[in-house]
Image (tube, rainbow, N blue to C red):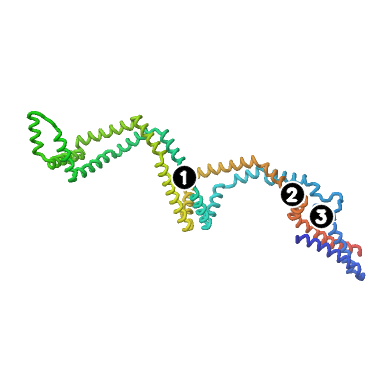
Amino acid sequence: MRSKNLATMSLAFMACGFLITLFLPENLAVILLRGGFEAGLVGGIADWFAVTALFRHPLGLRIPHTSLLLKNRDKIIQSLITAMETELLNKESIENKLRKFGIMSMGSKLLTKFFSKKKVRAQILEQLSEFVSRLPVEKAVPFLQKAASDYIREAELGVAADKIVTKLMNDGKDVAALDYALEGVSNWSGRPETKAMLGKIASEKLAEVKLGGLKGMAFQAFVGFMDADMLGEMLQGMLQSGIRDFREEDSPYREEIIREIRVALFQIVNDEARMASVKEWARNELEGEAATAFLHTQLENVRSKALSLLEEDRAAGGRKLFALYALLVRRISKEQEWIGSWEERIRASLITFVEANHFRIGLLVKENLDSMDDASLVNMLEDKVGKDLQWIRVNGALCGFVVGLVLTVVQFI
């Protein structure tokens, strides 16, 4: 300890000066110096004794009223705890400080400073990549299946289907679906192979018809006149004509079939037994092996895409991460009412925590001090405040020297 060495050197200097002046020839200067060194030596020894007596017994002698810190250890510890709890770190001062803090604003500034560093963003992205790569997606599949199955079991499928059908009808999707189907049938019926198929089917079915009398003769004459190709062409033309009629906006047949489609749809969605069977089928499919494999594949795809995005952003210095953070900050900064609400909640939680755990400050201080032996406690105190106390010794020696000079002059006068 530098100050302690300096104090010891000042005391040694006074002692040496006093001894040297004892052997010098008597004159005014020697007498003045001897008086100064003598008083400085007395002052230095007195202050050394006083400072040493605070921490230990001087020279190991158990002189009364020495080693004051150790003798009053419990009182000092209790006084320190009381001072911290009631003066330095009392609940009221902590609460007042917390009320003055803009917690959200301060947190935002710290986070912005944190995210502004490229190295930090890279580390965050690296940690996120490692976290995502270790996620046990196979364990999440059963939970997803169970959640979906439970939702379907509890869901009112009929009500949801009714709303969907109503929405589709209001948007004209049923009419669009009919037009799409008619377009498909029209394209199919116009193919040559369709004509051949229709002619073949009609020819076979007409051959199976058995009629007697004049009707039978007329029918057989008709069948004999019409071959499969003619029948196919006729049926194809009839089918094409019927489709054109259905596609006309003002066709009564079109209105009728649209009405029938709508009635059929509402009958289906309001059929509880049918909806129950649909729910049961959906649940069985969700809990099956095919759904398990599908969900696992999709989750792995999501993980792969996430890792790819994280790695891409990490190579770019985390620009997207910082942009996302900046977007969130700007969005949240507009919600002053929300910020004020959360700031008040956080502050109230901190104040409650302080009130509930304020006594632990004293307990922590006491536990730490009690865990230290006498030597460690003295060394700690000397290290913290001993430097300033050693200057008392230096000042005592210097002041004693000056006072000795003055007293010696007074004696001469």
> SS at mark 2?
loop
Give coordinates of residue 203: x percent, y percent: 14, 38
Q: CA distance from mark 3 to mark 2?
A: 20 Å
The residue under label 3 is which amino acid type? Thr
Can the viewer see residue 83?
Answer: no
Quadrant (top left/top right/bottom left/bottom right) for the C terminus? bottom right
First in sequence: mark 3 or mark 2? Answer: 3
Q: Image quarter for residue 23? A: bottom right
Would you call the spot at circle 1 few (<14 residues within 10 Å), some (14-19), or many (20 or more)?
Answer: some
How packed mark 2 is, by other alpha carbons closer than 10 Å (few <14, some 14-19, many 20 or more), is few
Element class at badge 1 = helix
Which label's residue is closer to the chain start, 2 or 1? 1
Q: Which mark is residue 88?
A: none
For marks 3 and 2, give the one nearer the viewer.
2
- Which residue bears the numbered disc 3? 52
> Would you say residue 93 is visible in this rendering?
yes
Mark 2–mark 1 distance (CA, rounded to whole Å): 53 Å
Look at discs 2 and 1 and give the one toward the viewer. Answer: 1
User: The N terminus is located in which quarter?
Assistant: bottom right
Residues 312 and 285: in front is 285
Residue behind mark 2 = 372
Image coordinates of residue 6 in percent, x first then y, are: 78, 62
Precedes in sequence: disc 1 or disc 3: 3
Q: Amino acid at mark 2?
A: Met
Q: As drawn, is 319 to the left or to the right of 268?
A: right
Q: Which residue is mark 1?
A: 138
Please tell me which residue lies in front, 137 or 196.
196
